[in-house]
Structure formats: C-alpha cells, structure tokens
Amino acid sequence: MLPVPFFEEKQVNAPWMGWVTVFAAVGTLVVVVVKLSERWYNTGSIAELIAGTLGVILIGGSIAWLAFTHQLAVSIDKEGISYVFVPSFYEAKRITADNVESFELRKLVASEMFGAKSSSRLKSKLPKKEICVVAGMLVVDLRLKDGRHVLLGTNNPDGMLWALKKLQKQD
C-alpha cells in the first residue's frame, strides 16, 4: 500500500472540448450521409452508404471518446511520484524519490511533442523523454538518474514544485 500523498493533481480536458468534438463528428456524419445518399441514389450501392456512415461514426466516436477520457493523474508521497496517463496507459507508473536527479518547471515546446516522434535523426540526438500533458503547456521536467526525462503537465505548478522539494529534502 502506498503512503498518503502530500500532493495530488488530476488534469483533464475541458468538457467543452469533448462536446465540440461530438458536434463536429455529428456534423461530419450528416454531410457524409447526405453526399453518400446522393451517390447511392445515382448508383444504387447501399454498401457504400453503410460503409461510409459506419466509418464516420467509428472515427468520430473514437475521437470523442479520447476527448472525454484523456487525463493525467499525479500524486507525490514520501516515497516518490506516481502517475497515470489515460488512455496511453492505465496502470500507475512509479518514480522513486532516489531516482530523481533534478527537476524544473518550464513551458513545453510544441516541437518536443511532434518533432521528436517524426524524425529518427532528431530523435537520436534528443534525450529520452516521456511526455504526459493533457491541458496547458506547463510541465515539470523530471530528470532521472538513468538519463531519461519525464515531463508531467501541471495546472498547479506551485503545489507540484513544493511537493517535489519536500520529496527531495527527505532523501
């Protein structure tokens, strides 16, 4: 059993983002069904109408599901840091206090999220990073003793920094 945390934060998408996604998916579905039904009327292929409609429902539903379920939960206790980043992984990951070399609060740069994944040449020159951000661009960059970086998004930077300093003093 884990000790009682002295800091907890849950980052979730704003509810309006999920609803905007749902309305966009429904709007797209209506347009696709109308266009496919016009085509069906001319060609008589009901299979195209059904396949196109199901495709839009599946893609739109998946995006809406992501918008509603995407979350990051972080807790810090006297033994270390636990975090869960849904839907990427559902089990808590744990970083022990003695594995944290240093930490800093900073803004996340968009190229860190997209550039490192798209270019193998760039990726080989960057340190290994695990980026967990749901809302906002403020992150706490945890540098671990094995050379990895874990970037945890936060909407409460003062609270997270206070907890990390408290954790570091206990070592």
Image (cartoon, rainbow, N blue to C red):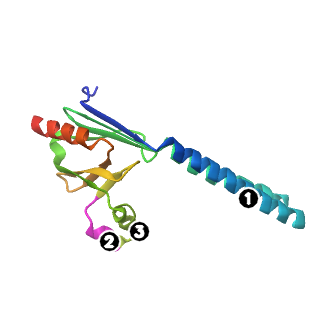
Residue 126 inside the magenta-drawn segment: yes
Residue 124 inside the magenta-drawn segment: yes
Asked whether 61 or 98 is in front, the reply is 61
Q: Which residue is mark 2?
A: 122
Residue 13 visible, this orientation? yes
Q: Main secondary structure of the magenta part?
A: helix
Q: Nearer the viewer, mark 3 or mark 1?
A: 1
**Residue at image point 20% right, 51% down:** 104
Rendered image: mark on residue 118: 3
- Secondary structure of the residue carrying tag 1 is helix
- Secondary structure of the residue carrying tag 2 is helix
Task: Estimate the x, y position of residue 121 in percent, counting from the top left.
Answer: 33, 74
- Secondary structure of the residue carrying tag 3 is helix
Please identify the quadrant where the C terminus is shown: top left
Numbered circles on residues, count: 3
The kind of residue tagged 3 is: Ser
Magenta-colored span: 121-128
**Residue at image point 77% right, 57% down:** 33
Q: Does the CB distance between marks 2 and 3 fall below 8 Å?
A: yes
Q: Is residue 44 left or right of residue 20?
A: right
> Dot 1: within a 10 Å radius of its alpha carbon, few (fewer than 14), some, or many (20 or more) residues?
few
